[in-house]
Image (tube, rainbow, N blue to C red):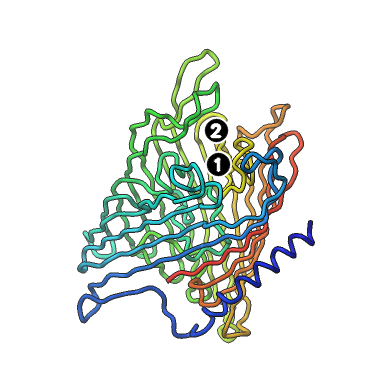
Amino acid sequence: MKIKILHILCSVLVISLPVSSLFAQGAKEYNGGLKIKLNEEGSKYFRFITWHQVWTRYNENNTGSTRLGEPQRETFDFGLRRSRFLMYAQLNKRMLILTHFGINNQNAISGGYLGLSGKKPQLFMHDAWADFTVAKRHLNIGFGLHFWNGLSRMSNASTLNLMAYDAPIFNWATIEATDQFARHLGVFAKGKFGKLDYRVAVNDPFSTNTSEDIQVERSLYNPSNNNKIYTGYLMYQFLDEESNLLPYTVGSYLGTKKVFNLGAGFHYNNDAMWYATQAGDTTTSDILLFSADVFADIPLNEEKKDALTAYAVYYNFDFGPNNVRNIGILNPANGGGSLRGNAFPVLGTGSTYYGQIGYLLPEFSEKVRIQPYGAYAYSDFEGVIDSNGDNVPVHVIDGGANFYFEGHHSKLTLNYRSRPDFTNPNDIVRRSEVTLQAMIYL
């Protein structure tokens, strides 16, 4: 198997090298994006950004997985993880408008129109909001479909500059349940007071798309939920100040800033879940989520241009009794139940600890910078149990390296993941994924 993985990766690297070599040229001159000034001072402008993230992946499938009706123990596939277009305009000193649309998670068997196949994925709106400055620096208020999320730093993460190859997904705790791909329709407020940065929002929950019938003592999303969502996140920025013009937080500054932040957040939605009691009565429960996190991005040596990036977060999730969501990103299997392909318990009532650390190696070439990294997630969900009723923890390990040809604008990321296969909770085995992500953004 190891020989097979090595052969696949060598083939992929040969295919990818011409693309990366092309974007290595002119590295010192490219500033990224298309920004057009609307007045001489540049205070009025609009900017366009577009990007693609393409995955080439080897996956050891979970037990019982099928692809197009055929059992498959392993899969080698290609997928479009993200393809996006974003534009925003500063109309004057007080008004900003942003529009963001695209697709996600398209492979040959899923992610297509109405989710029936891989063909013709639906282009949909991610963000559509307007922002008004009420008190410069201290208070902006905005409305629309937005990404000004509470809960944690990574709940607001930009996918353009992640350090690991992807987000862990539990950072978007209600993704595609009461939100639209981690976005909500609502009103938000954001601003800064000294070193304190805040964002809060009141949102409507989207009608749930979970189709499961109500279950005894296991909460699911309530299809009759009409209650507002209240969410917020605060962070104290001890060193360099980060921009809050847009909601998207940076995963790694690659030594261009010296940042150390502490943060905490919440997310509350009354009666957002429902379940049946042992007596057969239907009852509801709230979604109540908390987090605390720390982020550091520290340049180490000015001459070597190396840097350390680290992030750690604790989540306390309460989705009601025994709630668990199994998720497999860009799943290579379309048969075998909720634990098919690369799926495992990602969200649920309980606690999650997550950390990542990366080191930008000293600059040895003008054509490429290298950043090895590692990440680990530990979750303890009350609904993940074995046949004896004992809780079974979820461990996920990621390790890899980024190869930057033009900072985050052009990079390759090679990632190895070890995840659990919970098909038989009494005999949990480890499965491997090897992913090569090619990303370019203008």
Q: Residue at x 68, y 49 (%)?
A: 419
234 relative position to 404: left or right? left
Q: Earlier in the sequence, mark 2 or mark 1?
A: 2
Q: Residue furthest top?
A: 279
C-alpha separation, residue under disc 2 versus residue under disc 1? 8 Å
Q: Nearer the viewer, residue 117 or 280?
A: 117
Residue at the disc numbered 1? 347
- Callout 2, which amino acid? Asn
134 relative position to 72: left or right? left
Q: Position of residue 164 (x, y in %)?
A: 58, 61
Q: Position of residue 252 (x, y in %)?
A: 52, 67
Residue 93, placed above or below residue 433? below
Task: Kindly identify which numbered label has been placed on residue 323.
Answer: 2
Q: Residue at x 26, y 51 (%)?
A: 143
Q: Quadrant of residue 243?
A: bottom left
- Callout 1, which amino acid? Leu
Q: Nearer the viewer, residue 49 or 44?
A: 49
SS under mark 2: loop
Q: Position of residue 401 (x, y in %)?
A: 63, 68
